[in-house]
Image (cartoon, rainbow, N blue to C red):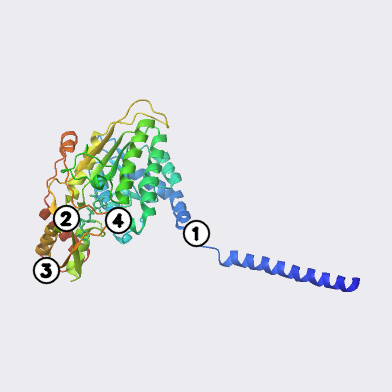
């Protein structure tokens, strides 16, 4: 009996040994042959460690020689619509500019790459990376003493917030905090100008919207994250002495624009003979927007930067009260969405196939209209492009960029 038990045990041992070695063999094979490829983050980090990356950052950050410009600006979201235009304008006047963008796929990143190519041809380097990457931000601030941060990176779009709410929290709240954290610890601290939104007025019915009006009734998660951003700005200003200016943009449009916006995809659909939907409010109320042309917005951004006072703290310590501002940047001449479509039809010489439908409960608001007196007074902001002129410039760019023929009136 002992013998049979012994035989049984030794057989048991050899089976478990065999199992053990087979398992080990499989694990080794898995790691050698099926190891996951490096994540985009780690391969990006390799790029960021190269000497070429550093020298490109430093070169781009240098203000134009022969001018007395001293400003060195970090532009986040530099490959975005507003970011590209603002970076180009800052560089053009001689400021040092370093861009940062994560090239996410909210809309076709090839448009973002094309914008980056445009900037790089002009001499602006756009580093690839995320505003939530604290290590990357530290590295940039370690290399360059930024005087200003133009924080334009964000998850944009009102209606997409219902599809992907987490992306709004990640970019517009966590991302903003990450940028403010690196700014507060910098020595000297930069002044910050950042993109808020007209959507913070939410269900406010008092028009035109003034900075003093209530903004505690956001109608979309997008608006709520922008409103949260304004409160977060207050906190960092209060605790750390950061100089912060928030800009409430009103439906910005123009060349190199965002394909998720109505004027952009209406143009595409009209040209391709696809239907477009025009929303209307209860009792057939007209839906309207204070559409604002990109060049006017750029002027407003630069004026905000030029009038920003220095932050008062350094290395995470406040030394005194600092500037905290918020401005409407709109056109102050709202237009019904139907009018936008009418102008596009004329410019494209194509009749749109339209459906007029009640506005779904998707976070949209009925109407926006900016009171811009404060920006006029403090920034000298004076928008000068009407919707027809602005759309003409947009359509000209669109036809050229997407390679359409000449069948239009522009
Ligand atoms: O002002 C702002 O702060 C916001 O402006 C735009 O948001 P929105 O004004 O909703 O711009 P679009 O998405 O281009 O819509 C423009 C108008 O077209 C209407 N629309 C949109 C889509 C559609 O299929 N049909 C339609 O009639 C909307 O109701 C809205 O009145 C931007 O997308 C936001 O990122 C920005 O923050």
Q: Residue at x 31, y 61 (%)?
A: 108
Which comes before the other along the chain, label 3 or label 1? 1
- Asked if labels 2 and 1 touch by Cβ distance under 8 angstroms, the answer is no
Label drawn at residue 351: 3
Q: Is residue 200 left or right of residue 168?
A: left
Above or below, 232 against 271 in this view is above
- Residue 78 lies left or right of residue 187; in this view the side is left
| Contact flag, marks 2 and 3 (Cβ < 8 Å) | no
Give the distance between the C-alpha atoms of the residues marked 3 and 4, in whole angstroms: 34 Å
CA–CA distance between discs 3 and 1? Answer: 50 Å
Measure the C-alpha gap from mark 2 to mark 3: 21 Å
- First along the sequence among labels 1 and 2: 1
Mark 4 lies on a secondary structure that is helix
Question: Mark 4 — residue?
Answer: 117
Queried on whether the Cβ of the residue with tag 2 lies below 8 angstroms from ligand 1, the answer reads yes
Label 3 element class: loop
Q: Residues within 10 Å of mark 2 (few under 14, many from 20)?
A: many
The response on whether ligand 1 sits within 8 Å of label 1 is no
Question: What residue sits right under mark 1 in the picture?
Answer: 38
The spot of residue 23 in percent (x, y) is: 67, 67
Q: CA distance from mark 4 to mark 1?
A: 26 Å
User: How far apart are the two marked residues, 1 and 2, measured between alpha carbons?
Assistant: 48 Å
């Amino acid at each position: 009996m002992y013998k049979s038990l012994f035989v049984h045990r030794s057989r048991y041992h050899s089976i478990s040994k065999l199992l053990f070695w087979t398992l080990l063999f499989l694990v080794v094979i898995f790691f050698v042959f099926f190891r996951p490829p490096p994540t985009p983050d780690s391969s990006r980090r390799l790029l960021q460690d190269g000497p070429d990356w550093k020298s490109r950052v430093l070169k781009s950050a240098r203000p134009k020689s022969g001018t007395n410009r001293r400003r060195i600006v970090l532009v986040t979201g530099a490959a975005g619509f507003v970011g590209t235009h603002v970076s180009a304008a800052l560089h053009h006047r001689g400021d040092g500019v370093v861009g940062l963008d994560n090239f996410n796929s909210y809309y076709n990143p090839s448009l973002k790459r094309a914008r980056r190519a445009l900037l790089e041809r002009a001499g602006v380097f756009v580093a690839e990376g995320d505003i939530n990457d604290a290590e990357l931000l530290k590295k940039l601030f370690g290399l360059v003493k930024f005087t200003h941060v133009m924080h334009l990176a964000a998850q944009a779009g009102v209606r997409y917030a219902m599809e992907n709410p987490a992306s709004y929290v990640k970019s517009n709240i966590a991302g903003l905090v990450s940028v403010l954290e690196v700014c507060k610890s910098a020595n000297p601290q930069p002044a910050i100008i950042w993109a808020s939104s007209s959507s913070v007025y939410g269900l406010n019915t008092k028009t035109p919207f003034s900075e003093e009006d209530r903004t505690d009734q956001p109608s979309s998660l997008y608006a709520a994250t922008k409103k949260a951003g304004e409160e977060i700005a207050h906190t960092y200003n209060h605790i750390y002495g950061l100089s912060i200016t928030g800009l409430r943009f009103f439906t910005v449009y123009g060349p190199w624009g965002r394909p998720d916006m109505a004027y952009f995809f209406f143009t595409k659909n009209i040209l391709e003979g696809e239907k477009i939907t025009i929303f209307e409010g209860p009792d057939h109320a007209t839906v309207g927007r204070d559409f604002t042309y990109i060049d006017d917005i750029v002027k407003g951004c630069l004026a905000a930067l030029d009038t920003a006072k220095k932050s008062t703290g350094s290395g995470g310590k406040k030394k005194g009260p600092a500037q905290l501002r918020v401005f409407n940047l709109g056109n102050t001449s709202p237009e019904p969405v139907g009018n936008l479509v009418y102008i596009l039809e004329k410019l494209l010489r194509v009749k749109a196939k339209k459906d007029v439908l009640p506005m779904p409960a998707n976070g949209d608001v009925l109407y926006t209209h900016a009171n811009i007196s404060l920006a006029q007074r403090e920034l000298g902001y004076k928008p000068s492009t009407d919707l027809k002129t602005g759309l003409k410039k947009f359509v000209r760019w669109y036809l050229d960029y997407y390679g359409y023929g000449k069948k239009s009136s522009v």
